[in-house]
Image: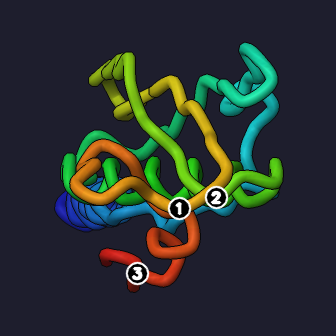
Amino acid sequence: MARRQRAVTVLLLALVTSACGIRPYTPLVGADRGEVEQLKENVYRVEYRVSSFTSQEQLDAYLRRRCAELTLREGYDIFHLAHRADVLALSRRTSMTVTMYKGKKPVGADDVYDAKEVLAQPELH
């Protein structure tokens, strides 16, 4: 009986520690169909999902990276994020509206991101 309890305990610990790990970034090409939705010519709704143990900082970084990839894929240079929606349950899900533009990032525009600069930043782990 003690051996069985030990085996169950080991199995539960393995499941918990694997669930606690941060899921590595999934590039845009690996995104599920519902994670990117075109709303207008240069406007999309982008969603990113992570485990509930992933930090807000990590989730935000993943979401910006996904938006930067989308921006470049669609032929734009910079993007603006708005209309955030967060859901926290067994996993965390955040979606934002991304508006993309061509040209250089305006000076002092902290809410506008240069897609190439975002992708040049090292990934958080």
Q: Earlier in the sequence, mark 2 or mark 1?
A: 2
Name the amino acid type tagged 2. Answer: Asp
Q: CA distance from mark 2 to mark 1?
A: 7 Å
Above or below for 39 versus 97: above
Above or below for 14 versus 111: below
Mark 2 neighbour class, 10 Å CA radius: few under 14, some 14 to 19, many 20 or more: many
Closer to the camera, 116 or 26? 116
Q: CA distance from mark 2 to mark 3?
A: 16 Å
As helix, strand or loop, the secondary structure at mark 2 comes to: loop
Q: Specify whether residue 4 is in view.
A: no
Closer to the camera, 115 or 93? 115
As helix, strand or loop, the secondary structure at mark 3 comes to: loop
Q: CA distance from mark 3 to mark 1?
A: 18 Å
In the image, is 85 to the left or to the right of 78?
A: left
Q: What residue did someone put label 3 on?
A: 121
Above or below for 109 versus 85: below
Q: What residue did someone put label 1 on?
A: 104
Q: Which numbered mark, 3 or 1, is in the foreground of this view?
A: 1
The answer to whether marks 2 and 1 mark residues whose Cβ atoms lie closer than 8 Å is yes
- Mark sitting on residue 35: none
Q: Earlier in the sequence, mark 3 or mark 1?
A: 1
